[in-house]
Image (cartoon, grey):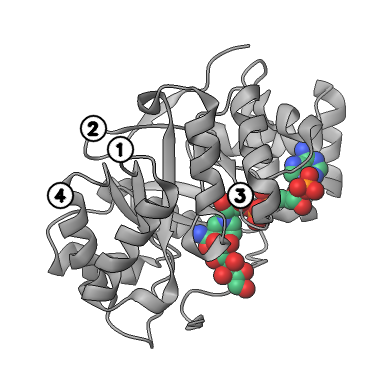
Amino acid sequence: MPAVPNITLNNGVEIPQLGFGVFQVPPEKTKEATLSALDVGYRHIDTAEMYGNEKEVGQAVRESGIDRAELFVTSKLNNGFHAHDDALAAFDQSLADLDIGYLDLFLIHWPLPKVGDFVETWKALEEVYRSGRAKAIGVSNFQPHHLRRLLDETDVVPAVNQIEVHPYLTQETARAFGAEHGIATEAWSPIAQGLVLKDPVITSIADRLGKSAAQVTLRWHIQRGDIVFPKSVTRSRVEENFALFDFELTEGDMSEISALNRDERTGPNPDEFNYVP
Ligand SMILES: NC(=O)C1=CN([C@@H]2O[C@H](COP(=O)(O)OP(=O)(O)OC[C@H]3O[C@@H](n4cnc5c(N)ncnc54)[C@H](OP(=O)(O)O)[C@@H]3O)[C@@H](O)[C@H]2O)C=CC1
Ligand SMILES: O=C(O)C(=O)[C@@H](O)[C@H](O)C(=O)CO
């Protein structure tokens, strides 16, 4: 099977463009699901303190027997820890729970514009980055105007912005802002948790190519250059979602899928989401 390409982040760190997400994977199933994904060939895992399964992701990484340097693990700062010292302590806790030596990427999970000042939070992540315990740092769910503040008021440009992207929410403005400033876009809920899989445009392309609707949708993300990490606890789907590199969508296919955009979110709007557990 052709290899998963790497994307080079703005500090030179390489990230596999396709990974495995573990949101809503219960902790008791996470070690097995992650080991299964690693067995299929995934080398990039996306978790978060919020998901409650960092320990189990770490167990899978350690038990897999795969060289740590071949793996890319992301985690995220939960919403209750935006104050500077809380952010530093939360990073320490995530790393202790994962117990994998270092994180490849650590993100502010949500900007929470009414909760505190994410610029202060970002400065804590810069300290973590300088310590070498996270090889790259980034943000999640940041709008261009949030990113603008980080660019204007802090030193390290986020390596990634992880945002909701799928055919019904193509995020052209946020992706263009990222591209202009060297911030890679990571597309969360890349198949919109299944919502787009019955779309007739996608199923008709899938039928023509002899691929599944999920494969066509994920391939659309890959050809747009975004980083994706679909979640599944179903081995056959985990395999299916990995088999994206032996076919191509035409420019016409790409345009047809992009034209499905209707600015429809499945998750919260980051300008309005201020939830702290
Ligand atoms: N930063 C953020 O705020 C957020 C980040 N994320 C990240 O993005 C990852 C992916 O997003 P997520 O919300 O999980 O949604 P996805 O778009 O990856 O969809 C997951 C759902 O689709 C099903 N599914 C997966 N593959 C297939 C397939 N080939 N055919 C049919 N159904 C399929 C899964 O079912 P099953 O498991 O039963 O097989 C599950 O119900 C998360 O795991 C997390 O890492 C997600 C949300 C927010
Ligand atoms: O999965 C994530 O990473 C999230 O941030 C979501 O769970 C998000 O917080 C949400 O769905 C809130 O309803």
Residue type (three-letter) at the residue carrying disc 3: Val
Q: What residue did someone put label 3 on?
A: 22
Q: For the residue carrying disc 4, how many other residues have a C-alpha within 10 Å: few (<14), some (14-19), or many (20+)?
A: few
Residue identifier under label 2: 12
Mark positioned earlier in the residue sequence (4 or 3)? 3
- For label 2, the crowd category at 10 Å Cα-Cα, with few meaning under 14, some 14 to 19 and many 20 or more, is few
Q: Quadrant of the N terminus?
A: top right
Which is more N-terminal, label 4 or label 2? Answer: 2
| Ligand 1 closer than 8 Å to label 2 CB | no
Report the residue marked by disc 4.
131
Is disc 3 placed on a helix, strand or loop? loop
Q: Which residue is mark 1?
A: 9
- Residue type for callout 1: Leu
Q: In the image, 209: left or right of 54?
A: right
> Circle 3: is it few (<14), some (14-19), or many (20+) Cα within 10 Å?
many
Secondary-structure class at tag 4: helix
In the rendered structure, which amino acid carries the disc numbered 2?
Gly
Labels 1 & 2 near each other (Cβ < 8 A): yes
